[in-house]
């Protein structure tokens, strides 16, 4: 079990960065090239490549070369389910926090 806990913690570390969360959200619909990710995020290719490398090392995304382009996809769709659950929890928290703020005299 200790190894599973360690692996869980390492995977969760990947999602502590807003850029990686944005990349994950973009890849939810299917594979995208690094060039497409650069255009959508408006970040540098070096920055996107660094984040993709981290995600690849943790088994979250996988690359595929086609010609001069490298395309990335999410390796396991359950990652999207976990992503959506966490996003839902955070959305509920924002709503509740806003409600509490408006109710405070």
Image (cartoon, rainbow, N blue to C red):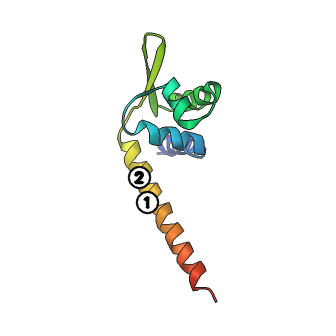
Kindly identify which numbered label has been placed on residue 88: 1
Q: Quadrant of the C terminus?
A: bottom right
Q: Looking at the picture, how far across and down is residue 32, in whole percent?
A: 43, 28
- Vertically, is 3 above or below 44? below
- Vertically, is 3 above or below 62? below
Residue in the picture at 51% in, 46% down: 5
- Vertically, is 91 above or below 66? below
Residue in the picture at 46% in, 55% down: 86
- Categorize mark 1 by other alpha carbons within 10 Å: few (<14), some (14-19), many (20+): few
Q: How far apart are marks 1 and 2 (CA)?
A: 6 Å
- Image marks 1 and 2: residues in contact by CB distance under 8 Å: yes
- Vertically, is 89 above or below 9? below
Which secondary structure, mark 1?
Answer: helix
Which secondary structure, mark 2?
Answer: helix
**Nearest the eye: 58 or 101:** 101
Q: Is 31 positioned to the left or the right of 43 in the image?
A: left
Q: In which quadrant of the rendered view does residue 50 lie?
A: top right
The residue most toward the top is: 67
Q: Mark 2 points at which residue?
A: 84
Q: Looking at the picture, how far across and down is residue 10, in whole percent?
A: 56, 40
**Nearest the eye: 54 or 26:** 26
Q: Looking at the picture, how far across and down is residue 6, in whole percent?
A: 54, 42
Residue in the picture at 46% in, 34% down: 60
**Nearest the eye: 78 or 45:** 45
Is residue 11 something that shows in the picture? no
Kindly identify which numbered label has been placed on residue 20: none
Residue in the picture at 51% in, 32% down: 58
Q: In which quadrant of the rendered view does residue 103 lie?
A: bottom right
The residue most toward the bottom is: 105
- Categorize mark 2 by other alpha carbons within 10 Å: few (<14), some (14-19), many (20+): few
Q: Is 28 positioned to the left or the right of 40 in the image?
A: left
């Amino acid at each position: 079990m200790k190894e599973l806990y360690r692996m869980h913690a390492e995977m969760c570390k990947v999602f502590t960065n807003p850029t990686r969360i944005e990349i994950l959200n973009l890849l939810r619909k299917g594979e995208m090239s690094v060039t497409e990710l650069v255009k959508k995020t408006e970040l540098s290719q070096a920055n996107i490549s660094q984040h993709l490398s981290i995600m690849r090392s943790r088994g979250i995304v996988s690359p595929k070369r086609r010609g001069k382009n490298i395309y990335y996809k999410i390796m396991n769709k359950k990652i999207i389910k976990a992503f959506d659950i966490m996003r839902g929890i955070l959305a509920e928290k924002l709503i509740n926090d806003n409600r509490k703020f408006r109710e405070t005299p």
